[in-house]
Image (spheres, rainbow, N blue to C red):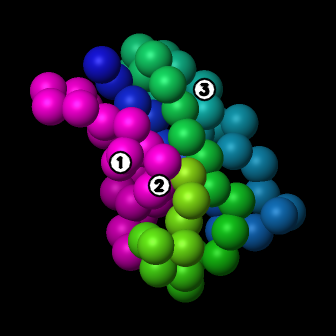
């Protein structure tokens, strides 16, 4: 299964571009965070949920690596 994760740093940003790219990549499930990039992984509920949802053999896809950097 392909699992998508999108992250925007401010409430002024829009995640549509990321969401569209993840859907085009064939993601079956997409998780999202709309919070400051300075927060830790533990504080990113969407990322935490994506990791907990993933099973052996699943693929986590992000639009750009900086969306995943902690």
Image position of 26 (left or right of 21): left
Of circles 2 and 3, which is in front?
Answer: 2
**Structural distance between the alpha carbons of marks 3 and 1:** 21 Å
Q: For residue 8: magenta?
A: no
Labelled disc at residue 47: 2
Name the residue that disc number 1 marks.
51
Of circles 3 and 1, which is in front?
Answer: 1
Q: Magenta part of the protein: which range?
A: 47-70
Quadrant housing the C terminus: bottom left
Q: Do the residues bearing badges 1 and 2 touch, measured as CB atoms within 8 Å?
A: yes
User: Callout 1 environment at 10 Å: few (<14), some (14 to 19), or many (20+)?
Assistant: some
Residue 54 position in % (x across, y down):
31, 36
User: Residue 7, can we see it?
Assistant: no
Residue 7 position in % (x across, y down):
58, 55
Q: Residue at x 37, y 46 (%)?
A: 52
Labelled disc at residue 20: 3
Mark 1, secondary structure of its residue:
helix
Image position of 62 (left or right of 35): left
């Amino acid at each position: 299964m392909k699992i998508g994760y999108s992250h925007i740093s401010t409430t002024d940003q829009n995640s549509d571009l990321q969401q569209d790219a993840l859907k085009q990549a064939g993601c079956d499930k997409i998780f999202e965070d709309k919070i400051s990039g300075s927060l830790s992984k533990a504080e990113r509920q969407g990322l935490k949920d994506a990791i907990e949802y993933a099973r052996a053999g699943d693929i986590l896809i992000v639009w750009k690596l900086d969306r995943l950097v902690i």
